[in-house]
């Protein structure tokens, strides 16, 4: 059972950061996972995301690419990380691996994971297919 502000860490798609904060990553092309709704969503898509019933933020980000505005993306990652201390934060792109995994790795860096180790951390604790391109991996590593 989850409390009102967190995810059930045993649910697939939940990433536990070293600080203990929990984030849910997912692909919007798949059914919504069971459990409580997010209290904040960060959507990483080239086109405007579908409407959701909770506060959300959109980062324009083409599939297999990098954010259109890297400053906005960095601000969005910080907001998601800060909110994850007291809220259920969801990050999602179409498939849930490339853009979502890259964002989770960037947030892991904010949480204290070394940038050079963040992709491996997310692949181990979220999904082995996270972060799909060399450019996405380099984007994470340049956060140091």
Image: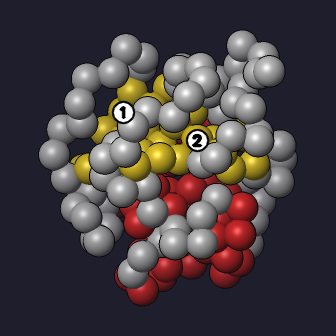
**Residue 63 visible somewhere in the drawing:** yes
Determine the secondary structure under disc 1.
strand
Residue farthest toward the bottom in the current orientation of the protein: 134
Q: Residues within 10 Å of mark 1 (few under 14, many from 20)?
A: some
Q: Quadrant of the C terminus?
A: bottom right
**Residue 21 visible somewhere in the drawing:** no
Q: What is the x, y in percent for residue 138?
A: 47, 82
Q: Is residue 48 left or right of residue 18?
A: left
Vertical placement of 41 versus 44: above or below?
above
Determine the secondary structure under disc 2.
strand
Disc tally is 2
Q: Is residue 50 left or right of residue 14?
A: left
Q: Residue at x 77, y 59 (%)?
A: 112
Q: What is the x, y in percent for residue 10?
A: 76, 41
Q: Is residue 108 left or right of residue 67?
A: right
Q: What is the x, y in percent for residue 94?
A: 31, 52
Q: Quadrant of residue 5?
A: top right
Provide the residue designation for mark 2: 24
User: Which disc is residue 117 wearing?
Assistant: none
Residue farthest toward the right in the current orientation of the protein: 19
Asked if the residues shown at circle 2 and circle 1 are in contact, with their CB atoms under 8 angstroms apart, the answer is no
User: Which disc is residue 57 wearing?
Assistant: 1
Q: Quadrant of the N terminus?
A: top right
Q: Nearer the viewer, residue 42 or 53?
A: 53
- Label 2 to label 1: alpha-carbon separation: 15 Å
Q: Nearer the viewer, mark 2 or mark 1?
A: 2
Q: Residue at x 66, y 33 (%)?
A: 84
Looking at the image, tell me whether mark 2 or mark 1 is earlier in sequence order: 2
Q: Residue at x 42, y 76 (%)?
A: 132
Q: Residue at x 43, y 33 (%)?
A: 32
Q: What is the x, y in percent for residue 125?
A: 72, 61
């Amino acid at each position: 059972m989850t409390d009102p502000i967190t995810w059930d860490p045993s649910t697939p798609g939940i990433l536990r950061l070293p600080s203990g904060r929990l984030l849910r990553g997912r692909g919007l092309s798949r059914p919504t996972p069971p459990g409580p709704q997010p209290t904040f969503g960060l959507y990483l898509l080239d086109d405007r995301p579908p409407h959701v019933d909770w506060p959300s933020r959109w980062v324009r980000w083409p599939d297999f690419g990098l954010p259109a505005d890297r400053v906005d993306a960095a601000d969005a990652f910080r907001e998601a990380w800060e909110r994850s201390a007291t809220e259920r934060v969801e990050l999602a792109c179409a498939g849930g691996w490339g853009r979502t995994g890259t964002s989770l790795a960037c947030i892991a860096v904010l949480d204290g994971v070394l940038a050079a180790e963040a992709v491996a951390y997310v692949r181990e604790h979220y999904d082995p297919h996270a972060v799909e391109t060399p450019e996405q991996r380099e984007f994470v590593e340049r956060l140091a």
